Image (cartoon, helix red, strand yellow):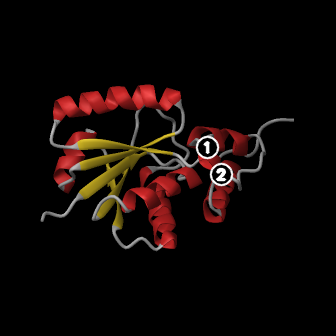
Amino acid sequence: MAERVGVYPGTFDPITLGHADIIRRGAKLVDRLIVGVTTNPSKNPLFPPVERIAMVEREVAAMGLENVSVVGFNALLMKFAEKQGASVIVRGLRAVADFEYEYQMAGMNQQLNARIETVFLMADVSLQPIASKLVKEIALFGGEIGKFVSPAVRTDVIERIVATGGVQGD
């Protein structure tokens, strides 16, 4: 039987506890899970790709998941998935708004390659509100982000914000 390969794509800027939850659970569904760290022209990343890849690699190593690897990419998701030999795209859902966007993307991806299925995993209830964009915003205004990211990622985010001009607000 062929190895079942899954791809969990995202910008991971930064990787959150919600992302880690999806990685842990997605790794149970496939023989090999590739966390694809990508660029997104519509987002303004806090970290460059090489740092995001290293951050995700560190977090995956801390989880002890031997069937998970991290690969950076800057290409159409379906082309990347094909190159990796994937048969599954893993996506996390937090809310109805996520579903609408992800449903549309899954339909477009199916048109590009009907051999690759998209699997949606609902975020753990305690992690549903977490979004990288909000984590960065909270940190930028001096809020505590330790509930949303690992201690190492918290340090990375705070150091980057200080290095790029510091905390904003009163």
Above or below, 10 against 99 in this view is below
Image position, residue 160 (x, y; %): 63, 52
Q: Is residue 106 left or right of residue 101?
A: left
Callout 2 touching callout 1 (CB < 8 Å): yes
Q: Quadrant of residue 111?
A: top left
Q: Quadrant of the N terminus?
A: bottom left
Q: Provide residue 30's location: percent of width, then percent of height.
A: 30, 60
x, y percent for residue 83: 17, 52
Q: Left or right of 11: which side holds 6?
A: left
Q: Which mark is residue 130?
A: 1
Residue plotted at (73% across, 46% down): 166
* Quadrant including the C terminus: top right
Task: Determine whether 157 is above or below 111 in the image.
Answer: below
* Residue farthest toward the right in the current orientation of the protein: 170
Tag 2 secondary structure: loop
- As helix, strand or loop, the secondary structure at mark 1 comes to loop
Q: Is residue 155 left or right of residue 21?
A: right
Depth order, front residue of 74/131: 131
- If you read the primary sequence from the N terminus, does the residue marked by circle 2 or circle 1 appear first? 1
Which residue is denoted by mark 2 in the rendering?
148
Taking depth in this image into account, of 145 and 165 the one nearest to the observer is 145
Inspect this view and state whether residue 16 appears. no
Q: Residue at x 17, y 32 (%)?
A: 112
Name the amino acid type tagged 1: Ile
Picture mark count? 2
